[in-house]
Image (cartoon, helix red, strand yellow):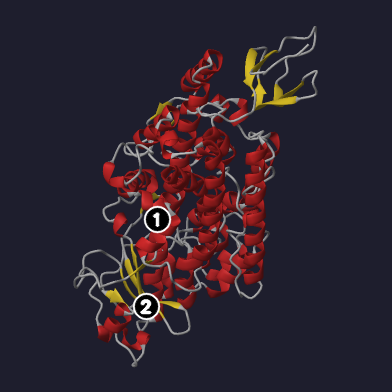
Amino acid sequence: MELGNILLVRLHKEPYRFFPPTNWNCSFIEVETPEGQTHRFPCYQWILGYPTFELREGTAKIARLDANDQLLSEHRRYELLAKQETYRYKDYQPGWPKCLDADSVDHLHLSDQYSSIKSCSFRVLLKTAEIELKLKGLLNLKGSWKKLADIRRAFWFYRTPTSEYVSKHWDEDAFFGYQYLNGASPGIIQRCTEIPAKFPVTQEMVVESLGLETTLEKEVEEGRIFLIDCQILEGIPATTLNGSLQYVSAPLCLLHLNPWGEMMPVAIQLTQQPGPRSPIFLPTDSEWEWALAKFWVRNSTLYIHEILAHLLHTHLLVEVFLLATLRQLPKCHPVHKLLIPHFRYTLHINILGRTHLLAPNKMLDKMIGTGFQGLSQLVARGLSKLTYSMLCLPDDLRDRGVDSLPNYYYKEDGLKLWSAIESFVSGMIGLYYLSDRAVEKDMELQAWVAEIFEKCFHQRQSSGFPAHLGTVAELTKYLTMIIFTCSVRHASVNNSQFDFGAWMPNYPSTMRRPPPESKGGMTFADILETLPDVSTSCQMLLILWLLSRERGDKRSLGYYPEEHFTEEGPKKVIAAFQKHLGKISQEIEKRNRRLLLPYNYLNPPEVENSISI
């Protein structure tokens, strides 16, 4: 008997006698016809209880191709209605992207939760670190550190080669500058095309740093002067920690790319308003005055890194990308199939973040100088200034004027991975969208991008984010940005946290004294009274260690064990992508062998497909 085209399979799960209720993690159903043909129906989700449900044959299709088939058109429509009922938005904080309306990971569908392996390793890591610090009596110690050696002993049982290097070189100017290229904050530095009026650095101030053979004006003209501007922090309120008021500033730092390829800080101002009460600190000042100025820059860029580059630009944005995909693109849609592996576990980790980190009286509220109130304001401010080009690496590097900067391994590796992802996306999209008109007329796709524009970017036209996609090229760039954000961008800002933050003086999470308004008289004791106290330092250390550790159940970039695409065309594109990533990995490893401090955060095996931590 000939079965013809099999469009759907209907499954019914029912209780079996006296056996206890069980859930079923269904990967796929395969049907073999009498003619010997095999049809695969992807599922890849937990089946809870005893439902009746339908699975569609795995060929990816845009809606237009189902327009003349009422059964399949209705199946698409009902699937989306069900998803829109299950995955609802809510406002978490004013001015933030919207998020899933769920107050606990227990409210998530089992398919969206961590696997038992990942949950177990997460809990073990946290408990191990807590026990270590409690045994040393550090977590509840509210006083200042007495000496730097005590910080080294705080976390003796887990160190990395990079964290050890940081603890030995943290106070060197060359290493200070290096971190804004290849450390935890590689997306902040920008070329300085003119000295800002608000930062009146003069030739006389920097002559010893630049040398007698050149001038500040000449170095600016030749593109060797760079700027870190923390203006976005101006006016962000500080909190009270352990009974003491903390302080937040918005410093500026001028850096010089010297003839030896080192990025050297040459001037620091701790506020945005120049004047007699806002001195410009220089490397020629006393040892501890210059050190304190650098501490302020490191503290301020920690906020920009953790709250904007990490929390906002990856976790919060991707949650909306994910929800819009589930709500507006049926599982048979090629864009859904392409993106879904890059959203694995993101809902789980984001809800964990909201319940344990991102709320009043929760962990971050007790360990960073902004507290939760300042953090919330900074996220809203950051979103109001975020642009599409900031998330598209080639555009961002060009806009910051650093696209030709040497020894910028984040740039080098990131551009290679952007190109690889772009080629992968182009290959996939070319199989299903044969013209710009096909993109223009895909109403599911247009509803998807419009929902992201509304729920994530609040329909702000000045952001440059599209509310509509009209060409294959526009769709390719947009999808490249999403996959890059889920994987490469997150790896660059997450995986480096412990390496560069374990040594607290390199990554102070708060400052307990205000920025100095004059020079002179600074001592080492003043430094220790300004840096975070013991308890705050150890709590921050605990979080950095937890968030940077590799847990079980990891899936590296390009590894797709779940076959959402069943056709041969997409499988060939995936294989080419994996080969491309393998070549990039070899190039990175070859380069790293000649480096004193290897940059491995964007080595494809170290980059996870999705934001899962």
Q: Is residue 229 above or below residue 218?
A: above
Q: Element type at marker 1?
A: helix
> Which residue is at 65% across, 60% downward?
583
Q: Residue furthest bottom?
A: 212
Question: Distance from label 1 to label 2 (Cα)?
Answer: 24 Å
Choose between 597 and 446: the one closer to the eye. 446
Q: Percent from the top left, x then y, of residue 12?
A: 69, 11
Q: Is residue 292 left or right of residue 516?
A: right
Q: Quadrant of residue 449?
A: top left
Q: Residue at x 29, y 83 (%)?
A: 218
- Asked whether residue 372 is in view, the answer is yes
Q: List the residue tagged with mark 1.
A: 304
The residue labelled by disc 2 is: 224
Residue 140 seen in the figure? no
Q: Say which amino acid is labelled 2.
A: Arg
Quarter assignment of residue 21: top right
* SS state under label 2: loop
Residue placed at 42% from the left, 51% from the top? 391
Q: Residues within 10 Å of mark 1 (few under 14, many from 20)?
A: many
